[in-house]
Image (tube, rainbow, N blue to C red):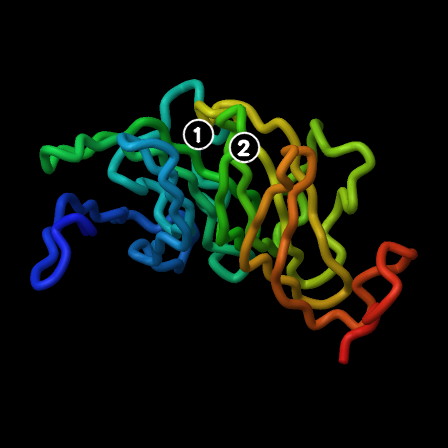
Amino acid sequence: YNPNAGPPSLALQYGMQLFGTTSAATGGLANNSDALAVIPISKKRSIVVGRTGSSDFLLTTPSASAYQLAHADAGSPAATGALDGFAIAIDYEATTTLLGLGWFTYLGAVGDDLCTGVLTDSEGDVVIGGYTTSTSLFAASPLPTPSPSVANSGSADAFACELDSLGTVRNWGTYFGGSGFEICRGLAISENGDSVVLVGSTTSSVLYAGTLITQNTTFE
C-alpha cells in the first residue's frame, strides 16, 4: 500500500501470488506455501522468504546458478518431511503494476524447513532465519567459525544462514538448539555487521550447555 495516498483512501500498488501445483513429497499438499517474512532492500526490490510443499513453486525452476535448484523432499514420503524454505527477490516498478522475479532458490533438506525471518547486511548479502527438522541442512561447508552447532540437536532446531546478494552462494549456515523444539521468530544484525541476533522460542530444558550466558540458562 502507498502510505503517501494517506487517509481517507489507500492505493494498492502491486500484488503477487506465490504458489505451486505439484506436491514435492508423496502424500504432501502441493498448495501448502506461505510467505512468512519480507524486507524491502531498495525502491525496486524486496526479498521474500517462507515455506512451500511444491516442487514447481512459482510454476518455474530456479536459474542454473541458484543456491538450491530443486525441492529437497521431492519423491520422499510426506511423513519424513514435505516442506522446504524458499527465498525470492521480487523486482517492481512503483509506477506500474509490473512485478518480476529477480532470483529464486529453495532452502531445505530432507525434513521440514521453514524460513521465518530475513534481513540484509551492508554488503547486500541476505541473512535468513528459520527452523528445521532436517539433519543435513548444513551438511557441507562453509559454516561460521566457531559454529554454535553443526548438527540438528533435537526434534527441530532454529537455524541461520547467509546467502550472497544473488541467491547463488551460501556464505555460512548454522543450527541453533537443544534437545527439544526451537523456532527462530526474528533476526537482527549488529551495527558493525559482524554479529547476527536470533530471537525465538524453545522447549529445551537446557539450551546453553556452556557458559554463553549467566542467567536463565534453563527452561522455566
| Mark earlier in primary sequence (2, 1) | 1
- Give the x, y percent position of residue 207: 79, 63
- Give the x, y percent position of residue 87: 42, 39
Question: Viewer-proximal residue, 23 or 211?
Answer: 211
Question: Viewer-proximal residue, 172 or 53?
Answer: 172
Which residue: 56% across, 48% down?
129
Q: What amino acid is at disc 2?
A: Asp
Which residue: 53% across, 28% down?
122
Q: What amino acid is at disc 1?
A: Leu
Badge 1 element: loop
Name the quadrant containing residue 147: top right
Badge 2 element: loop
Name the quadrant containing residue 86: top left
Mark toward the viewer: 2 or 1: 2
Which image quarter is the C terminus in?
bottom right
- Give the x, y percent position of residue 34: 35, 55
Left or right: 205 in relation to 51: right
Which residue: 65% across, 63% down?
182
Outermost residue toward the bottom in this view: 220
Q: Where is mark 2, residue-wise? A: 121
Left or right: 21 in relation to 196: left
Q: Which mark is residue 136?
A: none
Q: Which mark is residue 69?
A: 1
Which residue: 19% across, 34% down?
99
Outermost residue toward the right in this view: 211
On screen, residue 188 above or below 31: above
Left or right: 149 in relation to 88: right
Q: What is the spatial separation of the Cα atoms under label 2 and label 1, in whole angstroms?
A: 24 Å
* Crowd class of label 2 (few under 14; some 14 to 19; many from 20; radius 10 Å): some
* Crowd class of label 1 (few under 14; some 14 to 19; many from 20; radius 10 Å): some
